[in-house]
Image (tube, coloured by chain):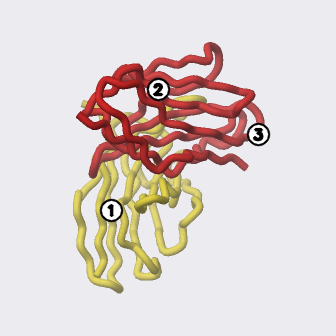
Amino acid sequence: AQSVAQPEDQVNVAEGNPLTVKCTYSVSGNPYLFWYVQYPNRGLQFLLKYITGDNLVKGSYGFEAEFNKSQTSFHLKKPSALVSDSALYFCAVRASGGSYIPTFGRGTSLIVHP
Amino acid sequence: DGGITQSPKYLFRKEGQNVTLSCEQNLNHDAMYWYRQDPGQGLRLIYYSQIVNDFQKGDIAEGYSVSREKKESFPLTVTSAQKNPTAFYLCASRLDRGNSPLHFGNGTRLTVT
C-alpha cells in the first residue's frame, strides 16, 4: 500500500519570505514523487517530480523540492513567495515498480500575504 | 494546443437523473483517469483506463460508469445510484511511460439537488 501525508491543511507566509509545504510518504520500494498545484476552479498542474538522482529537484515557477529518503519526505520549497503562489498544493506518490496509479495527499492551502 | 477538455464546466441535475461528463484529450495519451474532489479530502480515483476498450474501477467506483471507445475520449456517467454526487470532477491523462506525470482538465462542477 502507498500513502501520502500532508500534515498542514494551511500554510501562511508573507510575500518575499521562504515557503515550505510538507509531504511525507509511505511506499514499498523506491518512490516516484510528484507535486501539483491547483488554482480555484481549475485542474491540477504538474510542478515537479523526483524519480532518481539528485535529492534537490527544481520545477516550474521557481519551486523546488527536497527528497529525504531516511525521513520519507518530499517537502516543497520556494526561496521567496509571491502572492500569486497562493493556491492548493498536492503531493503524490507511487511505487516505481508498482501500478501507474499515484496516491494523492489531501492538499495544503498556501496563502501568501502581501 | 494539446490538452484535456472537460465539458460542461458547471452542471446542474435533479436527484434521480443520470448525467454524463465529457472528457476529451488530444495529447495522444494512452491512459485516462477520473477523480472526484471534495473539500478537505484530496483526490479520489473513480475509474481509469490504460487502453481503448478497457477500464478498471478505482477506489470509489460505485454509482459511476465509464466507457473508452476511442483513445481521445473517456466519458463518465454519474448514475442515480451514486448517493452523494455533488462534487468537482477531474479528468486526467498520462503518457504511458514509467514516470510521466498526470495532465488534468479544468474540471466539471456537478450539483445535484
Q: Tell me whether circle 1 and circle 3 mark residues in contact (CB < 8 Å).
A: no
The chain drawn in red is: A
Side (left or right) of B45 relative to A86? right
Q: Is residue A51 left or right of residue A111?
A: right
Where in the figure is residue B15, as x and y percent of width and height? 33, 84
Q: CA distance from mark 3 to mark 2?
A: 25 Å
Q: Mark 1 = which residue? A: B21
* Residue type at tag 2: Lys
The chain identifier of the residue carrying mark 3 reads A
Tell me the number on the disc at residue B88. Answer: none
Determine the chain carrying the residue at label 1: B
Give the secondary structure at mark 1. strand
Q: Work out whether residue A97 or residue A62 is closer to the camera in this orientation and state it.
A: A62
Estimate the spatial distance between the alpha carbons at disc 1 and disc 2, rounded to whole Å: 36 Å
Q: CA distance from mark 1 to mark 3?
A: 35 Å
- B28 horizontally vs B49: left or right: left
Quadrant for the C terminus of chain A, please: top left
Q: Amino acid at mark 3?
A: Ser
Query: Along the line of sight, which residue is nearer the eye, A1 or B6?
Result: A1
Q: State whether residue A54 is above or below residue B21.
A: above
> Looking at the image, which residue sits at the far bottom?
B16
x and y percentages locating residue B45 in the rendered image: 52, 56
Q: Residues within 10 Å of mark 3 (few under 14, many from 20)?
A: few
Q: Are marks 1 and 3 on the same chain?
A: no
Do pointers 3 and 2 mark residues of a single chain? Answer: yes
Residue sitting at 47 percent across and 26 percent down? A77
